[in-house]
Image: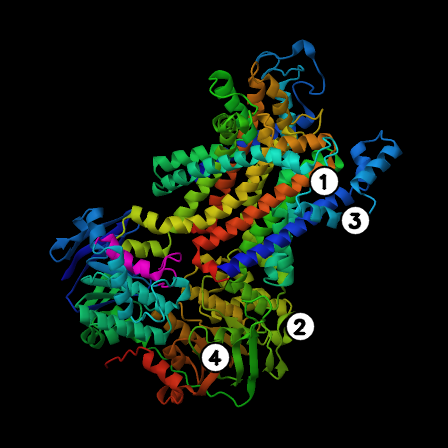
Amino acid sequence: MSGRVQLILGGALSAVFLLAAALSLVWVPHDVAALNIADRLRPPGGAYLLGTDQFGRDMLSMLMVGARSSIAVALVAVGIGMGVGVPLGLLAAANRSGWLDEVVMRMNDLIFAFPALVIAILITAVLGPSALNAILAIGIFNIPVFARVTRGAALSLWTLDYILAARVAGKGRARISVEHILPNIASLLIVQGSIQFSLGILAEAGLSYVGLGAQPPTPSWGRMLAEAQTMIYTHPLLAVLPGLAIVLMVLGLNLMGDGLRDALDPRLRRVAR
Amino acid sequence: MLRFALSRLLSLGLSLLAASVVIFAAIEVIPGDPAAYMLGMNATPEAVAALRDELGLGGAALTRYLDWVSGMLRGDFGLSYTYRVPVADLVAQRLWVSVPLAGYALALSTLIALPVGLWAAARRGGPVDIGVMGATQLGIAVPNFWFAMLLVLVFAVKLRWFSAGGFPGWEAGVWPGFKALTLPAVALALPQAAILARVMRSALIETLGQDYIRSARAKGLSRGQAIRRHALRNALIPVLTILGLQFSFLLAGAIIIENVFFLPGLGRLIFQAITQRDLIVVESVVMLLVFAVILVTFLVDLAYAAVDPRLRRR
Amino acid sequence: MIAVQGLSVAIGGTPLLRGVSFGIDRGQILGLVGESGSGKSMTALAIMGLLPPGAHAAGRVVLDGTDLLGLSEPQMCDMRGRQIGMIFQEPMTALNPVQSIGDQVAETLVIHRAATRSEALRAARRRLDRVGLPEGRFPLGRFPHELSGGQRQRVCIAMAIALRPQLLIADEPTTALDVTTQARILDLLKGLVEEERMGLLLITHDLAVVAGMADRLAVMRAGEIVEQGPVADVLRERRHPYTRALVEASAHHPGADLRPTDRPLLQVAGAVRDYPQPRLRLFARPAPFRAVDEVSFEVRRGESVGLVGESGCGKSTLTRAILGLEPLQGGEIRLDGQAVSAGQRMQASLRRKMNVVFQDPYGSFNPRHRVARLIAEPFHLTGRPVDADARVAEALVSVGLTPEDRHKFIHEFSGGQRQRIAIARALITRPELIVLDEAVSALDVRVRAQILDLLADLRARLGLSYLFISHDLHVVRAITDRVLVMQAGRIVEQGPTEKVLRAPEHPYTKELLAAAPVLEVPP
């Protein structure tokens, strides 16, 4: 699949979910907080486009609101990762082999030893479960990822002659980092951001599935799956729909990331020209 | 090589030390009074005081930390508050499920991913490559616990080849235990294999563009020979990195998957402990999980040196 | 022995080679010379049957009566390594980093089933001995990263000649190496050709290398051979205008006669730069590596001084110290009487007085900025003047470009044009000293001649001083008044360029001069 096709397909898929999530802020087909036992376990069709769950809640509305919480968690987590990780990475690269670099890298290694789930477990054990924990856990996990990617890319830029030329022009390390390094690694960070965003969606689903994420009554894809698990023999659709939503959303983001990489990578661009 | 191993061992020790400080601080220092927390809001002051006594919370944080660490070094992880048994026994029991599951999944994912990645790279741009890339793209997007549910639906409910969950215990024999772990391992392995296959493919393609592959071809090696004799081993270096990282994903995945299949592993233990506010168990299991990740990082470092002679000198 | 007849190569309808024909006999060396992109390497790859995917070859490549272009891939695999060997430009990356050199040489024999593994290893030992890597210092178990560039190129040669092929193709085999190493590798190749009665196709951009080595010379331009014949005849007669242009550019000497003043501009006194070494043991701190060792010299106003040495001699470190990018551990550097210090502490008004042009025309510019912003960057030192735009335009004109070029991005320019832009950037703050760090080394000869002319002209017009760092003695002779020869961190000889190059005193200078290939152009 060519980069352009990936970009369009992935962008379209992601856009559908983003729009659905945005729409859920102002309108959903049915109220997701209201339980309606009379209409429980309806098959798709009629007033309920995708059917209802065991409490009579509209699946489509649940999925729309679930998209909102998934996207919000993943987005804020990427924001935390980028906001802390990128400056740390730039700082480490600008002071290559200095003590600052050493400290940043050692801290990275330490955080890497804690999988996101373990961080979530730690936070939940101490503070009790909430959606905020998922954001924090995934966000903290993202920090070393962005710090490493930033540092690695920045280090290879620091060896280039135009950086040396900027230093000869009297520019300091901080200024060079912002003026020359950051714009030239931006495309890489955007691609990494889209990858971490899709990983964040997956991680949020996993955390809320085991009860460490969004708490009832807020609908989330992971908890919809957990609740559907006991019904899987009789009503498999309840487990299939939220799962499909996750797959399509993540697939869309990944395709878009790959497409972006092709579109933004100057190496590939040069070959194309 | 020995010097390299020793220096890595030193950094392993330092990482463990730092991790233990972080975990201890998170569980025992930051929340204030763990005893009050464990007993919940309705506890009487007397009960809290009794538990504080039992947990040895009277001393200074530093003394308690040193006690905790030296206890762990002796294999003493403390007493579970809810089960009233040593945590070490609880954990040891559960490890017999979790470690085989993680190992099984790791083996499956490697055995699937490496040949598939090689196959796709060797036929770059062809129908095989496009098919593999499409399949892996999908595989990456599938959450493993949902995949596990689908597997249960198909292989346990519809086809009745496997049971939907539970673990007979190794006392019932190796084969039944193995069978009970198969669906969970597949559910864990396939999404990881998708990632690994893509890494293998791109590492091989990158290696195939290197000058030394051209030198090898100029010696008269065919494309296939050049891949087997030169590209594979060099491509292994990035693959090892990802394999090491994947271990922590696998570990986290295993904890979640155990819940889907009702397996009595570490994952079930830790979630029960969280609901029961059994901080002693949480603390020990988290330390164990982090230890496993750090140990794997160490092993990956050693494997690097085995593959790449350039690292052995350092 | 081998005859290439009407060889044409095209990728997707774009012709890369057109009707290339030549022949090589046993024991003969054919030099194939041309500028980058002329199709030299493509010719070699076509003979080897290793063209990039999508490329299509037509014509005939006849080796001992067999047309190689007609062979199947398995038959061609059998030919490669057995009948034709090849070595490449970049020895640092041409060997598999995770396999020992013995295994890599032996592989040539094993793959062609010419020997068992143990026999192959014994043969590899003999081949490595022959290419100058004796057993004592270079056992078979050595890995590539333990060898220098020249030694790695020897391993590549051993690999290529392990089965005594009839034809050896060497694609820029010494371009990445220092002159003294180059001379030894060329000697080795020449000896092997005589001994083994092989044919050698020597591909290079350097006429001087061919002049000293080859029997015949073929000149290539834009995918075609424009002229070929015995080396001496081609160089003497220069029938084709392109050959004439190449030869003249190779021997180019900008004929400016400038009188430097006596007033010193740059004074380096007892400069020392140490680098800490990595710890091998936990508690023993190793002695630091001294990259620049008690270096002293002067550059006077209006003077052009050359700094010559091989890679790793410390000239780049010294350059960075002069530019105020690295601290010294001893001695001092003064520019216009003021001390140069590393980092932000150095005053902008002092920094403004010097600037630099680097070697790589591709890595010297931020690809995201337009030319106007690139050239104006040094205004950071002076504050942006009101007539900044006019000065950028003026700088562009002074290096032979047009003011309109300031709106373009850097990827729209060729290597030579980029080097002009780099010079414009160096001129923008009206400095007095320009450091030229291998500034013409990456350019083709004709472009190089133009840039040398430009530099000479600018110096005459603006009264600039140059510190010209280079590994190429010929270029140094063309553009400097005085030369410093650097070896292992020390300046071993200095004096007027003509005098040092004509009558060197230090043994190292003599060695360098003896090793440098000379293009004697018959009148």
Q: Position of residue A265 (x, y in %)?
A: 48, 48
Q: Nearer the viewer, mark 4 or mark 2?
A: 2
Q: Nearer the viewer, mark 4 or mark 3?
A: 3
Mark 1 → mark 2, Cα distance in angstroms? 58 Å
Q: Which mark is residue B78?
A: 1
Residue type, mark 4 in image: Arg
Q: Nearer the viewer, mark 3 or mark 2?
A: 3
Q: Position of residue A118 (x, y in %)?
A: 64, 39
Residue type, mark 3 in image: Ala
Q: Residue at x 20, y 73 (%)?
A: C231
Q: Which residue is disc 2 drawn over?
A: C345
Asked if residue A50 is positioned above or below residue C174 in the image, the reply reads above
Mark 4 → mark 2, Cα distance in angstroms? 30 Å
Direction left: furthest residue:
C65
Residue B154 part of the magenta-drawn span: no
Residue type, mark 2 in image: Arg
Q: Residue at x 40, y 38 (%)?
A: B116
Question: Are the residues at dot 1 and dot 2 in contact (C-beta closer than 8 Å)?
Answer: no
The residues colored magenta run C90-113
Q: Which residue is disc 4 drawn over?
A: C459
Q: Is residue B65 left or right of residue B308?
A: right
Q: Which mark is residue B61?
A: 3
How many numbered marks appear?
4
